[in-house]
Amino acid sequence: MSYEGKIYRPWMEADSELIQVTLGCSVNTCTSCSMFRDKSFRRKPLEEIFADIDMLRRYRGRVESIFLIDGNVMVLKTELLLKVIARIRETFPELKNLAMYSGLNDLRRKSVEELKQICRIRRCFRASFAINFNEPARMWFRRRPNRLNTNT
C-alpha cells in the first residue's frame, strides 16, 4: 500500500482498511480544517489504485470495511469512481462497508442517475461529508441563524 502525506480517517472508520484514491482536498480552503494543507490535490493513477487493492487482498485476506481516502473522493468523475468501486467489490465480495469523504458540493454535482449507479454497484456505501462554510451551497446557512451554528 502506498500512502502519501498525513492520513486522516473518521473515528467510525477505525477498523476500516484504507485505500488512497486522491491526495489532498480539492477545496482545501476551509477555515475550520487544516488536514490536507501539506498536499496539493490530485487523483492517484488508476493503475496505482488497482495495485493497492490487489496488495490489500494479498496481505490482509478477508476485508469487511474499506475507507477511501483523502479529502473528497466524490470529486472524481463518476466513471472513474465506478471502476474503483467495481474493482473493490470484485476483489472483496465479503465487504460489508465501503465509505469515503465527500464535500457537499461534490455530491451535489453528481446527477441522480450517477448517484444511483454508485449505490447500485456498492451495496454498502457511506459517505462522510466535510462541511465547508466557504462553499456556495453552505452560504445560505449563514443567513439563517436558527439552522446551523457557524461561529466556528
Image (cartoon, rainbow, N blue to C red):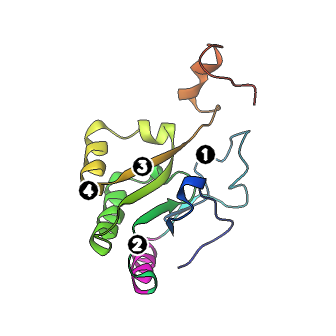
37 sits left or right of 27 in the view = right
What secondary structure is marked by label 2? loop
The magenta span reads 45-58
**Lower position in the chain sequence, tag 1 or tag 2:** 1
Q: Which residue is rendered at x = 33% and y = 54% of the image?
A: 124
Reading the image, the residue beneath label 4 is 121
Q: Position of residue 109 (x, y in %)?
A: 41, 38
Is the C terminus in the top left, top right, bottom left or bottom right quadrant? top right
Q: Main secondary structure of the magenta part?
A: helix
Q: Is residue 132 magenta?
A: no
The disc, 3 or 2, on the residue closer to the chain's N-terminal end is 2
Residue where numbered disc 1 is placed: 27
Left or right: residue 47 versus residue 28 is left
| Amino acid type assigned to the residue bearing label 2 in the image | Val
The residue lying toward the viewer, choosing from 18 and 26, is 18
Question: Crowding near pointer 4: few (<14 within 10 Å), some, many (20+)?
Answer: some
N-terminal label among 4 and 2: 2
Residue type beneath disc 4: Ile
Label 3 crowding class (10 Å Cα cut-off): few <14, some 14-19, many 20+? Answer: some
Q: Can residue 141 be seen in the rendering of this structure?
A: yes
